[in-house]
Image (spheres, rainbow, N blue to C red):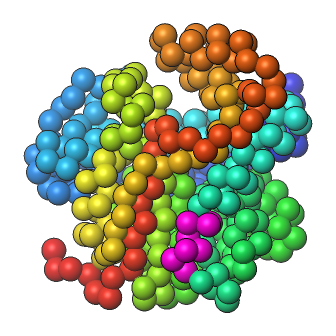
Amino acid sequence: MSIICIECTEPADRSLTRQNADTIWGSLHSRRHTSPRCPVCERPTLLRRSAVPNYALRACPKCRLEFLDPQPADSVLAAIYSDDYFLGERGAETAERRSKMKSATGAFYIDTLARLVRPENADLLEIGCGHGEVLLEARKRGFRISGIDISEHAAAIANRRLGEPAVSVGTIETLPLAPDRFAAVLGADVIEHVRDPEGLLLRIREMLIPGGILLLITPSLDSWTRRLLRSRWMEYKVEHLYYFSAMSIRLLLERCGFDEIRVSPGRKVLTIDYIARHFSRFRVPILSPLIGLLRRAVPGRIAHRQLLLSASGLMAIARKADARRPQ
Ligand SMILES: [Zn+2]
């Protein structure tokens, strides 16, 4: 059976992708957090009833950060990223709709950034840029663009789509990028995956120009879906190593030398069809069958209509402070 990229439906080599994930995620995830203290506010943490099968989940009683402890092995994460993340079912129509949805979400992120950073002659970096939909939107508005992705396949697609070698394979920790270069850095759905979020933010800070802006998107423990679904929340996954509340992301950003921090519910452009597919792939009792029923009940033109929704994430915007506060 041939293996296809879930986003572009082009053939992809499973062994190459696995090797890619093994080496790159292995490097990124080489440092493991094993302390029972909260890595954000340093309070002793509590074990909570784990929502992630086979993994213990710790929660901070002060800032409400949650994290897997111990973290999954590199080989477990590499298998998840190589098989389920980058590769998947065939379907050019689905891929095109998904790409349009990502572009619309990207346009929303870039419009948000462009209100804080004048795009003309400003350098923007996207971490985890996938197939480059957000970078395309950024370039349309006048940003000079750079991207990083751990998937060699995704980076190749992005560069072809962009018509310039703007995307590199690797991580912000390992790539030799110049410090004090970027006016804006965007990381959507990245920080919850890394073993060392503090290290990631410090590296981003190093690469921002003074006063540069960071925009982060990550699942939120304050979201309505988390409050409703509790331990059945769809964001509890083996590959999500950290779960932030508004308070914990704010504290971590302050600790890493950012100020003018604003945290708000994250919004994404989604369709009923996409939501139904997601809940069919990642089953949640009661909710998955209900959403399946809804999908079957609505006509196609409504199921594919783009909606800007607040579901499970937060958006954090922060400015590189002039100096880091003493710890
Ligand atoms: Zn804490």
* Residue 127 appearing in the image: no
The dominant secondary structure in magenta is helix
Is residue 49 found left or right of 180 in the rendered image?
left
Question: Residue 129 at what x, y percent from top left?
Answer: 65, 59
Q: Is residue 295 or residue 126 the one in the foreground?
A: 295
Q: Is residue 200 above or below residue 164?
A: above
Report if residue 116 lies within the magenta region. Answer: yes
Q: Classify residue 238 by image quadrant.
A: top left
Q: Classify residue 254 by image quadrant.
A: bottom left
> Dividing the image into 4 quarters, which one contains the N terminus?
top right
Is residue 22 found left or right of 10 in the rendered image?
left
Q: Is residue 218 or residue 36 the one in the foreground?
A: 218
Q: Is residue 106 above or below residue 98?
A: below
Q: Which residues are magenta?
A: 110-117
Question: Residue 274 at what x, y percent from top left?
Answer: 68, 31
Report if residue 7 lies within the magenta region. Answer: no
> Dividing the image into 4 quarters, which one contains the C terminus?
bottom left
Q: Classify residue 36 by image quadrant.
A: top left
Is residue 306 found left or right of 256 in the rendered image?
right
Task: Tally the marks.
Answer: 0
Question: Residue 19 at what x, y percent from top left?
Answer: 67, 48
- Residue at 49% from the left image edge and 65% from the top image edge: 215
Q: Is residue 136 above or below residue 266?
A: below
Question: Residue 62 at what x, y percent from top left?
Answer: 14, 48
- Residue at 47% from the left image edge and 76% from the top image edge: 213
- Residue at 59% from the left image edge and 74% from the top image edge: 114
